[in-house]
């Protein structure tokens, strides 16, 4: 729909930013399709459900930090 509303082009590519190989594939796709990459915006993030801290595992906390802070 967005391509019909004005100039330019829209393209969607699924990318799990926690997976480095998917980020590389996304960059390669973009350069192949458009010839260059001008800007990257990481709009990924997650907010855990409202639970007390003792209801989160160490792994849950690491995943939250990895997605929201590291990636």
Image: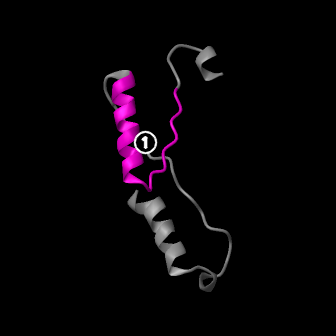
| Residue 41 on image: x %, y % | 43, 42
**Residue 13 highlighted magenta (yes or no):** yes
Q: Residue sitting at 52 percent across and 41 percent down?
A: 14
Crowd tier of the residue under label 1, counting other residues whose Cα lies within 10 Å: few below 14, some 14–19, many 20 or above: few
Residue extending furthest bottom? 54
Give the residue at mark 1.
41
| In this view, 70 is above or below 60 | above
Q: How is the image coloured?
A: one colour
| Residue 15 on image: x %, y % | 48, 44
Span of residues in magenta: 11-33
> Label 1's element?
loop
Q: Residue sitting at 52 percent across and 27 percent down?
A: 11
Q: Would residue 42 appear left or right of 53 to someone viewing this image?
A: left
**Residue 25 highlighted magenta (yes or no):** yes
Q: Residue sitting at 39 percent across and 23 percent down?
A: 33
Q: Residue sitting at 34 percent across and 34 percent down?
A: 28
Locate the C terminus by quadrant. bottom left
| Residue 63 on image: x %, y % | 49, 67
Residue extending furthest left? 36
């Amino acid at each position: 729909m967005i391509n019909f509303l004005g100039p330019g082009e829209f393209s969607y590519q699924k990318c799990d930013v926690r997976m480095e190989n998917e980020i590389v594939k996304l960059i390669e796709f973009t350069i192949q399709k458009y010839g260059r990459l001008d800007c990257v915006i990481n709009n990924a993030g997650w907010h855990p459900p409202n639970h007390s801290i003792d209801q989160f595992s160490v792994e849950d906390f690491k995943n939250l930090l990895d997605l929201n802070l590291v990636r």
